[in-house]
Image (cartoon, helix red, strand yellow):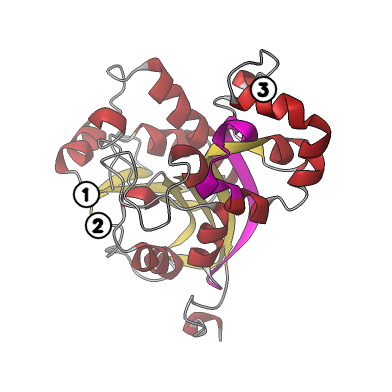
Amino acid sequence: MTFSEELEGERLVPGETSAESWAEHLERYRFAAKFVRNRAVVDLACGFGFGSDVLQRAGAKSVVGVDVDREAVSYATEHYRDPPLRFALADGQALPFHSASFDACASMGTLAHVRRPQAFLSEIWRVLRPGGLLVLSTPNRLVSNPGRSRGARPINPYHVMEPTFTEMRRLLGSSFRVKGYYGQMFQPVETILTPGSLLTILARHPALPLLILPRAGEFARVASGRSSKRRDLRVYRYAVLPFEGRLMAEAEPRQMVLVCVRNAVRADGSPDASAV
């Protein structure tokens, strides 16, 4: 549950991280920063603190960065000293905050590291005020692990689970309403069509066969590596974009980014006592 655990164990330390990893994570925080102005924010799995600093500079009323890595929290505390910004050593599945303490929560890539995702989301629900915002990113299994089932171990050795969008909606349950679905690092649909992923993609995009039929020959050539006409999606590599319309028909994002609103009902259907 920390940004010090990423692909190949790369640590996201300012000045020490590859330009690619840095750009990828920075863009997600810049996107989340659009929703934090004048809000009390908790940043879960803040790592070495650079993302929490982005949120603070965007005009958040206050930001608390949380991580289970003692070294990361120590680094963040030492390097980011703006008074409204502070850091706490804690587990995201058992947060040391009163209920309804925050107006917004950022969770950039945390879910993939969580062994009890429902407990994690329940804690976020608890510490957010009614109507509070959750900006959450997570790898999309259709792209990061094409053809693998929900219960299969992800390829990334530091991850314990990677959902599809449909599975993510189920996890959120009645606790959160998805206000906006965005994506990052898009992959052409035809490059991830495997027997294991095809049915899930069709469930997500039921009109896809109608879009594919007129271009069936081209899809076959792309899939076999014999085409040079594959759409260039590099312009979308790091940008966080609304995942809809033509883009949805042609690509899947490697990283899903959801903007959610906290409902007054828990995932188990019980009401929020503070809202009654």
Q: Position of residue 159 (x, y in %)?
A: 31, 45
Location of residue 200 with respect to 265 vertically, above or below:
above
* Residue neighbourhood size for the residue with mark 2, other residues' Cα within 10 Å, grouped as few (<14), some (14–19), many (≥20): some
165 and 62: which one is in front? 165
User: Mark 2 or mark 1, which is nearer the start of the sequence?
Assistant: 1
Q: Residue drawn 60% across and 27% down?
A: 223
Q: Are marks 3 and 1 in contact (CB under 8 Å)?
A: no
Residue type marked 3: Arg
Residue beneath label 2, please? 91
Q: Which mark is residue 221?
A: 3
Q: Which is nearer the eye, 170 or 46?
A: 170
| 15 w.r.t. 40: above or below | above
Tell me whether the residue at label 1 lies in contact with that at label 2, contact meaning CB atoms closer than 8 angstroms. Answer: yes
Q: Residue 192, how many percent across, how many down?
A: 55, 36
Tag of residue 68: 1
**Distance (Cα) linking label 3 and label 2:** 48 Å
Disc 3 to disc 2: CB gap under 8 Å: no
In the image, the segment drawn in magenta is 174-198
Amino acid type indicated by mark 2: Asp
